[in-house]
Amino acid sequence: MRAKRTGIALLLAAGLAGCGSSGDNTQALTRRQVQGLVTQLETARAAAAARNVAGTKLALEKFRASVARLRRDGALTDDAARTLRIGAARVLARVEIDNPTPAPAPAPTPTPAPTATQTAPAPAPLPPGQKKKHEEKPKHGKGHGNKHEGDD
C-alpha cells in the first residue's frame, strides 16, 4: 500500500513541478486548484488502498478531467498536463495489476431430468447358473380358484 501512496504523491509532485509561469503565458495553479487535484488523488489513493478498482478508476477519471480543464484554462503547461495524465494512467494500470478481476465462475451444467429408466437402479447381475424369477401375476377369472355365481 505504501507503494501506491508514494506513486500518487510522486505523480502530483512531478505534475505540479511543471506548473506555473515559465515565460509561455501560462499562469500558476492557485492554491484551490492544487487542493482540488490533491483531494482527487487522495480519493483515488483511498479507493486503491481498499482494493476498489472501480472507485480508483472513477477518481482518476475525475482527476484527468480536471487536468484537461486546467490545461484548457491555461493553468497547466502541455508538459505538466501530459505528465499528470501519464501518471494517472500508470497508477490505474498498477492498481488493476495488483487487483485482477476474478474470472467468472463457470456456469453449472444443467442436470437432465431423470427418465423412467434412470429413476430405478439397475438390478444386480445374477450369479452364474441362477435363473431369473418371474413375478407372479394376480389370478383372475375361471379356473383360478375364484368362485363365480353359478359355479357351486
Image: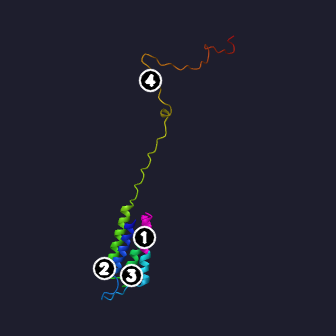
Dot 3 or dot 4: first in sequence order is 3
Q: Main secondary structure of the magenta part?
A: helix
Q: CA distance from mark 3 to mark 1?
A: 19 Å
Is label 3 in a helix, a strand or a loop?
A: helix
Q: In this view of the protein, which residue sits in the foreground, 129 or 138?
A: 129
* Dot 1: element: helix
Is 43 included in the stretch rendered in magenta? yes
Classify 82 as above or below 91. below
The reply to whether discs 3 and 2 touch (Cβ–Cβ < 8 Å) is no
Answer with left or right where residue 127 lies relative to residue 148. Answer: left
- Tell me which amino acid carries mark 4: Pro
Q: Which residues are magenta?
A: 40-59
Kind of residue at badge 2: Asp
Colour convention: rainbow
Q: Badge 2 is on which residue?
A: 79
Three-letter amino acid code at the position of disc 3 = Leu
Q: Return the x and y of residue 115 as percentages of the image width and height.
A: 49, 36
What residue is shown with label 3? 70
Q: Looking at the figure, which quarter contains the N terminus? A: bottom left
**The disc label shown at residue 92, or none:** none
